[in-house]
Image (tube, rainbow, N blue to C red):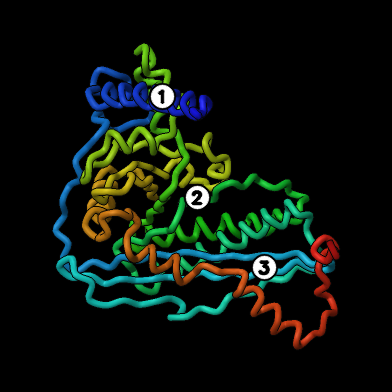
Amino acid sequence: MKNLYIEEIAKKILNIENERKEVCEIIKNTFLSQYDIKKEGLKEDKIIKPVKEFEFGKITVAAVDGGMISKNFRDLDLILLRAVGVIFFYNNNKLISSAYYPENIVSPKPKIYYEPFYETELEANSNIERYTEEIKTAREVVEKFKPDIIFLHGSIVPQYLTIPKKKSILYDNFKIMINSYLELFDSCVNNEVILSGLIEDSRSNKFCTIISNLLKNHEKISLLNKIKDSFILDYILKFGERTLVFNYSPKENPILSEFGKYSLSISSFYVKNTEFDRPIRVEYLGNSLETADKIASILCTFSKNSTYAIPPVVIEADQRAKLSEDDFNLFYSSLIKKLGRHGLDELRRFQRPF
């Protein structure tokens, strides 16, 4: 028996995909020189650009990632944090040695709050603490190793946070986090280190919005308002190509307004740096097109897995930083042995007999 629902859904998906492919063809054949690109904050008049090749002799590539796991108890909240820096030293595009910061195996760092947050506050505070630990570690890596480039696994600005009210118990930690970012930015500028963030599963539609605004009079282009960047660019970009560079504005992320002189100094582009994986979104500190070219070239040169776009140094940092329930349970068990259960009673909903 035929399932009419499946047939109908499949037909609709195919129709949508064909329409999107038509839009992709329009974009690929568009030259922006006839449009007011400055209005959209663009500095390049070609939507797609080949990645420039650089001669890399000796180059130091670093990455930092963080892991976090949290749990709230009756009388306190407990967070475990870990941030790890990985440094790869290359010569003539070959990895010759590596280093780890603060050490090869990093023990999780506990944070205890004796005035428990509401559940939503706990989640926000946990993210703030994770960002702070990760960004602090990144600054220390920059100052100790002075790499040519340092990657964060994710954005170089905080995501999915709102600015707490000044009377909120979150506010002090929020300001510490902001200062950590500003110190990292200053350190990268002073040490001439490129700071870049790699977003592997971006759900942004900024690129589509820009193109839609420029080509708004085209009958098909309105479809871009319903499409994520990653879908369109998977069709448009070929291996060894990047998009034009666009600005990351405070309108997209209000927290950027807290970044003072750096609030207008975050740029983005997409690059297809491996043959069989989707493009990744890249962010970097600054507005230089030369910096974008260099980052794209580094990614195309050192991302050796043809089916996975994230470079090895970031993968290594991710693997060393991640925390699991087993890590938490090990820490919790050790603490219980010292304390008994005093002060670590679980919430009632986790003790239900049914």
Q: CA distance from mark 1 to mark 3?
A: 44 Å
Residue located beneath label 2 in the image: 157
Do residues under tags 1 and 2 come within 8 Å of each other at their CB atoms?
Answer: no
Query: Taking the image as drawn, is residue 38 in sight?
Result: no
Q: Quadrant of residue 179?
A: bottom right
Earlier-in-chain disc, 2 versus 3: 3
Q: Secondary structure at mark 2?
A: loop
Q: Secondary structure at mark 3?
A: strand
The residue type indicated by label 2 comes to Val
Q: Quadrant of residue 268?
A: top left
Residue 79 image label: 3
Number of marks present in the image shown? 3
Q: Nearer the viewer, residue 287 or 157?
A: 157
Residue located beneath label 1 in the image: 16
Do residues under tags 2 and 3 come within 8 Å of each other at their CB atoms?
Answer: no
Q: Is residue 191 above or below residue 267?
A: below
Nearest to viewer (mark 2 / mark 3): 3
Q: Quadrant of residue 72?
A: bottom right
The residue type indicated by label 3 comes to Ile
Q: In the image, residue 134 lies at what x, y percent?
A: 51, 64
Q: In the image, residue 135 lies at what x, y percent?
A: 50, 62
Query: Is 72 positioned to the left or the right of 82 in the image?
Result: right
Q: CA distance from mark 2 to mark 3?
A: 22 Å
User: Would you call the spot at circle 1 few (<14 residues within 10 Å), some (14-19), or many (20 or more)?
Assistant: few
Nearest to viewer (mark 1 / mark 2): 1
Q: In the image, residue 61 lies at what x, y percent?
A: 30, 65
Residue at point 28% right, 52% down?
Answer: 295
Residue at point 51% right, 78% down?
Answer: 106
Residue at point 52% right, 48% down?
Answer: 259
